[in-house]
């Protein structure tokens, strides 16, 4: 007999548990889990979502004396100014060039490194290599920049010493655009290759070992095992990190470039973030720098969505 029929005969008004009561019941039952979740939730709420209130600066002629709310609205003035500025497109081109080269060189590096580590027979030696390769990641770019200066300086660095030893004339490598770009790529790979390989090593560790045993019976060597078993098995992880990596294609690496670049390479090394730093913090054009930041974030979001769609069509692996 249906519930409605029973209600019609008895005249009782059956109330279903409300959605609110269900949420409160879940909170009560899993209060300790939600308590563990609270610090992370508060972090994102305060430091990620809270500052988004400042987005309205891009649509106002901000005056620190008047405050955000009292400053007059100007609409899309700063967005038009940004797109009409020739130098903005220069720094955008520099950012894309540096970021694409970092992806081209830096993205495959930890994958290859993880595959090579996986081939090491000695577990002890593998752990030593992995530990040493992870250490540079925990150094700030200020320290890494100091190390780079000690290596490439023509007067007191290793490069200058080698040139003097062989009678060569040393050059200012950080003052040459091509050499500067090469130093950026090499230092970025050196710093991140070990730490970035951890997730690939974890993916490799999850591969069923029976697949390797079967391939040995079929006569496959180590190279073919890597080519036909290891790489296809970690392909979803590779696709996911590739899509997420494209989200930062307009970053370029502010910390690295800010600590290494100089006036001689600024025409080719100045990126969006360093441009925003000078415009926003040095020249105090807060509204214009906010508009640039919003445009950068929107473009990055579109790139991630497009990359996710393309990767999904080509490999059937998507992030979302």
Image (cartoon, rainbow, N blue to C red):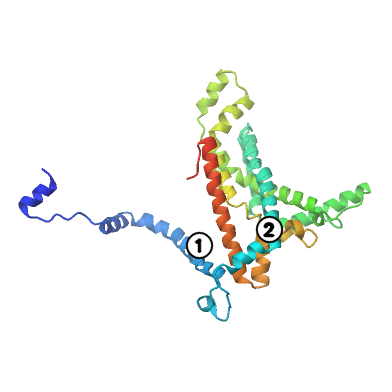
Q: Secondary structure at mark 2?
A: helix
> Outermost residue, top direction?
218
Q: Where is residue 136 shown, x and y percent of the image? A: 67, 51
Residue 8 visible: yes
Q: What residue is drawn where x is 48% and y is 66%?
A: 50
Crowd class of label 2 (few under 14; some 14 to 19; many from 20; radius 10 Å): some
Where is mark 2, residue-wise?
A: 89
Q: Where is residue 183 shown, x and y percent of the image? A: 75, 51
> Quick one: 182 or 139, which is closer to the camera?
182
Q: What residue is drawn where x is 58% and y is 55%?
A: 299
Q: Where is residue 236 shown, x and y percent of the image? A: 53, 38
Spatial CA distance of label 2 from label 1 is 28 Å
Picture quarter with the N terminus:
top left
Q: Where is residue 108 shown, x and y percent of the image? A: 65, 40
> Outermost residue, left direction?
9
Residue 128 visible: no
Mark toward the start of the polypeptide (2 vs 1) = 1
Vertical arrangement, residue 235 with respect to residue 62, above or below: above
Determine which of the numbered discs, if any, sits on residue 48 in the image.
Answer: 1
Vertical arrangement, residue 182 with respect to residue 143, above or below: above
Look at discs 2 and 1 and give the one toward the viewer: 2
Q: What residue is drawn where x is 53% and y is 74%?
A: 73
Kindly indicate whether the residue at mark 1 contacts the one at mark 2 (C-beta within 8 angstroms). Answer: no
């Amino acid at each position: 007999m249906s519930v409605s029929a029973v209600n019609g005969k008895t005249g009782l008004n059956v109330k279903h548990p409300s959605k609110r009561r269900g949420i409160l019941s879940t909170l009560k039952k899993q209060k300790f889990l939600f308590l563990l979740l609270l610090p992370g939730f508060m972090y994102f709420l305060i430091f990620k979502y809270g500052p988004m209130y400042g987005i309205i600066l891009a649509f106002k002629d901000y005056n620190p004396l008047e405050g955000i709310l009292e400053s007059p609205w100007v609409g899309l003035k700063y967005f038009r100014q940004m797109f009409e500025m020739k130098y903005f497109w220069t720094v955008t081109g520099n950012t894309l060039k540096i970021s694409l080269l970092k992806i081209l060189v830096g993205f495959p590096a930890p994958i290859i490194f993880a595959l090579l580590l996986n081939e090491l027979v000695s577990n002890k030696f593998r752990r030593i290599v992995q530990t040493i390769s992870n250490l540079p990641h925990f150094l700030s770019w200020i320290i890494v920049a100091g190390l780079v200066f000690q290596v490439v300086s023509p007067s007191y660095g290793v490069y200058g010493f080698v040139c003097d030893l062989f009678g060569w004339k040393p050059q200012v490598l950080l003052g040459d655009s091509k050499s500067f770009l090469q130093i950026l790529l090499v230092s970025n790979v050196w710093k991140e290759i070990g730490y970035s390989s951890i997730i690939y090593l974890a993916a490799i560790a999850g591969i069923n070992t029976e697949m390797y045993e079967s391939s040995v019976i079929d006569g496959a060597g180590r190279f073919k095992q890597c080519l036909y078993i290891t790489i296809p098995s970690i392909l979803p992880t590779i696709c996911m990190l590739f899509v997420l990596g494209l989200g930062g294609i307009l970053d370029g690496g502010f910390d690295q470039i800010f600590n290494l670049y100089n006036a001689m390479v600024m025409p080719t090394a100045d990126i969006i973030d360093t441009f925003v730093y000078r415009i926003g913090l040095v020249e105090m054009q807060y509204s214009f720098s906010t508009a640039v930041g919003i445009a950068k974030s929107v473009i990055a979001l579109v790139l991630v969505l497009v990359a996710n769609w393309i990767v999904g069509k080509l490999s059937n692996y998507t992030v979302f």
